[in-house]
Every structure is written in C-alpha cells, then in structure tokens.
Image: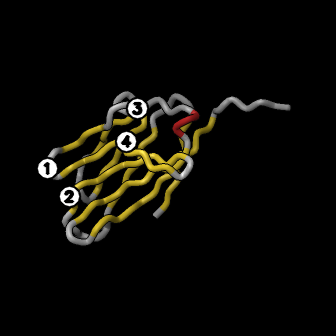
Amino acid sequence: TQQTVLAAVGEDAEFSCQLLETKDVLQVTWQKISNNVETNVATYSKYYGPRVNDGFTDKFRFKNTGLQNCSIVIRNVMEQDEGCYHCLFNTYPDGSFTGQTCLEVYGKNFNLL
C-alpha cells in the first residue's frame, strides 16, 4: 500500500511498514527512489540487526525494529528528502514484498514570478 507523509522543513518524518501476512522475513530494506533509481538507505536483518548505510547515518535512524513491522525516522527533513521510499520485506522462500511511502515537504522556499 502507498501512504503519504507530510513534514515541514526541519521536522522529523516517520515512515512505518508492516507485512500483514506472517512470513519468514530475513531482512527489511528501506530504499529511496530518485529518478527511478533505488538507493538502499537502511536495513534491518534477522541476523545482523539494524544498519543505516554509509552516507545516510546523519539523516536516518530506526524507530521500531521488527521483521514484520519496521519504522524509520528521517531527521531534519529538507527539500531534497522529498520523494518516495520503498520498504522491502525479503522472505524465504516467498521472495520480497514491497510497500511504498512518499514524503511531501512543505514550508519550502517558493519563488514568486
């Protein structure tokens, strides 16, 4: 399912993702989508725990770490954080299940012509 989160510039935004079916989840991966390119920002692994990828540690943190229900926080939201994010539940043997959340940032600087 897709949901939209609204946040003002400078605020924190929370995204959560839940897998409604009970599956054997090995890992939850959060990705930012920019220009149709998916960039991994954070993962929560059954075996290795939570990890925010290099380059994103100042921006993202985990709030709830669970293999069926996982949430992250984007700190100090800025205009460039706007866009859509995927959460991927990697399961065995069923493959991956994807959810999508989009962030809309308000309080941006608008140029009036």
State the residue position of label 1: 47
First reached walking from the N terminus: tag 1 or tag 3:
1
Q: Are marks 3 and 4 in contact (CB under 8 Å)?
A: yes
First reached walking from the N terminus: tag 1 or tag 2:
2
Which three-letter amino acid code belongs to the residue tagged 4?
Answer: Val
Left or right: 39, with 19 as reference point:
right
User: Which mark is drawn over residue 101?
Assistant: none
User: Which mark is drawn over residue 26?
Assistant: 2
The residues bearing labels 1 and 4 have C-alpha atoms spaced at a distance of 18 Å
State the residue position of label 3: 59
Residue 12 in which image quadrant: top left
Residue 25 coordinates in the image, percent (x, y) = 22, 61
Instruction: Determine whether the residue tagged by mark 3 lies in a helix, strand or loop.
Output: loop
State the residue position of label 4: 41
User: How would you rate the neighbour count of disc 1 (Cα within 10 Å): few for under 14, some for 14-19, many for 20 or more?
Assistant: few
**Residue pictured at 13% horizontal, 49% vertical:** 47
**Residue pictured at 23% horizontal, 52% vertical:** 66
99 w.r.t. 102: above or below = below
